[in-house]
Image (tube, coloured by chain):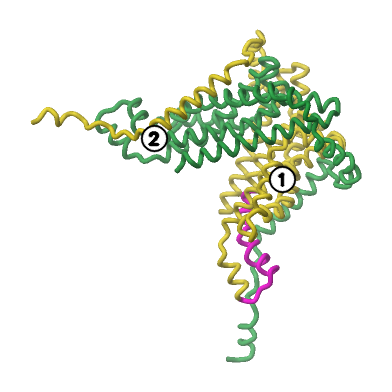
Chain colours: A yellow, B green
Amino acid sequence: MDITMKKLPPKPVDLKKRIVHWALSLITIGIIVWSCTGIDFGGIKETAGQIAGAIFSGIFHPDWSYIYNGTGEDLVSQLWETICIAFLGTFISAIISIPFAFWAAHTKHKRWYVSRVGKVVLAIIRSFPEIVLALMFIKAVGPGSAAGVLALGFHSVGMLAKLFSEAIENLDDGPNEAVVAAGGSKTNVVMFSILPNLMPALISNTLYRFDVSIRSASILGLVGAGGIGYPLIIALQYRQWNRVGVILLGIIVMVIVIDGISGWIRKKLV
Amino acid sequence: MTNADEEKLLTLPRKKINFWNLVWLIIFIGGLFVSTGVTKTSLNAFFTNFDQFSDIFVQMLHPNWAYMETVIPLLLETIKMAVLGTVIGSVLAFVYSLLIARNIVKNKAITGILRVIMNIIRTVPDLLLGAVFVAIVGIGPVAGILALAICTFGIVVKLFYEAIETIDPGPIEALTAVGANKLQIIVFAVLPQVITYFISYCLYAFEINVRASTVLGYIGAGGIGLYLQQTLQVFDYAKTGTIIIVIILVVVLIDYVSSKSREALMK
């Protein structure tokens, strides 16, 4: 047998592709190196290990008396409040989202710029920091969970309306035409073809947003807009590391349970 | 055909009422009442104080452009934090995903336990992690970077291990058949199939991190959020408006660039 047979043929080289790859990698590495400059990595507390240990021991040895004592200041009632904030906030945002979604869906307009403007508006709402919104609502309705509900309700519109508008864009035109062909009016089209076809997507997106809202609602308390975040920030300020651990444990359990329930409902829907 | 039959044909069939839909509706409405009660939300209070709310908004719409110079350095710090958080988190996520993919690690006990840990890490929201890390390591960008790294980890691991599990098993079998070890299988059979997905997920996580990092400073975890807190505390809404406009511009810009490059990557 010829010895040359044992050699593999050389790999084909696409020079242009290779240059682009190298350039991109260099840029990425450049950005990462740039990021490392000018950040103060020192100043980590010496007690960091101790504190982390104390928080962990709080997770594994929860302070049972705090979990439920019926005063309304305990873990379970605060978690319940968080869930209620998320529920009501998601409901409000789902209702506000529907008109926004029709605005941003490009299949519903003849002129291209209408939906484009709608999409930009939604992007701006999405990027408006939730915490600032919560603080603005605190000015309006006072500190407490009501501010959290309103902040969540308005902030979620950005994401939810985007998901809704994508669902509207994916709708099949057939049923609409069928209703029109049978002599239906515009309202009939919406009632008998658009809404029934859209409903599963709306519900499943809203449920998904509810999962996200639960996490947001537990953050809003950090600025005083109700929910579990408030006791957490208090516990952090008073260095009650045990309690921090318990609250974290509570949040983890709550999020896992809610995710499980909404995942189960979504599976039933499909 | 009798008259009764004809009449029957003319009327539409009766709609069936689904029992479970009714139950869901009742649960849902009950939930609305309960949660309104618990949170004491009343739209009346909102509308009576609406002028206060809109007043802040109007002040924000007249931003103080001179404040821009102060904001830019911290804005850069914010982006640096997001980059570092993404890099650290995705490197960890890369290794971890290989460990929990069932088509690479066959031991179900190991993957099961590691997955439970991953799911627990994924549940804690970014800002809460930030607050905890501020308490642990002290005020500064390091706390923010750690919080972002853990968030990135949660996002990327979930997406990436699912991508690994859906690859074509052919190349793995071929390499096993010629006697390759685990590392060689990963490098030559698994990675070529999933590396574009990994980069795309990292970019996606980066978008989320930029968004998150802008408010991390509010609780002392470094970045532009620090000024957000300072200006809000002294009710200087014109400056707050400047910061928010800058944040929105940066977030929208980075979102756009990153989503376009993800599209290009997936082509």
State the image coordinates of residue B48 (x, y, percent, origin top left): 91, 45
**Crowd class of label 1 (few under 14; some 14 to 19; many from 20; radius 10 Å):** many
State the image coordinates of residue B142 (x, y, percent, origin top left): 63, 18
- Which of pointers 2 and 1 lies earlier in the amino acid sequence? 2
Left or right placement of residue B225 versus residue B256 in this view: right
Q: Extreme bottom residue here? A: B2
* Cα separation between marks 2 and 1: 46 Å
Tell me the quarter of the picture where residue B84 sits: top right
Q: Which residue is mark 1?
A: A90
* Nearest to the observer: residue B69 or residue A137: B69
Left or right placement of residue B260 versus residue B32 in this view: left
- Magenta segment, which residues? A182-206
What amino acid type should be assigned to the residue bearing mark 2? Answer: Lys
Mark 2 or mark 1, whichever is nearer to me:
2
Determine the chain carrying the residue at label 1.
A
Q: Do circles 2 and 1 both sit on a common chain?
A: yes
Q: Which residue is mark 2?
A: A17
Q: Is residue A191 magenta?
A: yes
What amino acid type should be assigned to the residue bearing mark 1? Answer: Thr
Q: Secondary structure at mark 2?
A: helix
State the image coordinates of residue B121 (x, y, percent, origin top left): 59, 28
Q: Extreme left residue here? A: A1
Q: Secondary structure at mark 1?
A: helix
* Res A32 visible: yes
Left or right placement of residue A181 versus residue A80 in this view: left
* Nearest to the observer: residue B101 or residue B111: B101
* Quadrant that contains the C terminus of chain A: bottom right
* Quadrant that contains the N terminus of chain A: top left
* Res A64 visible: no
Q: Extreme right residue here? A: B48
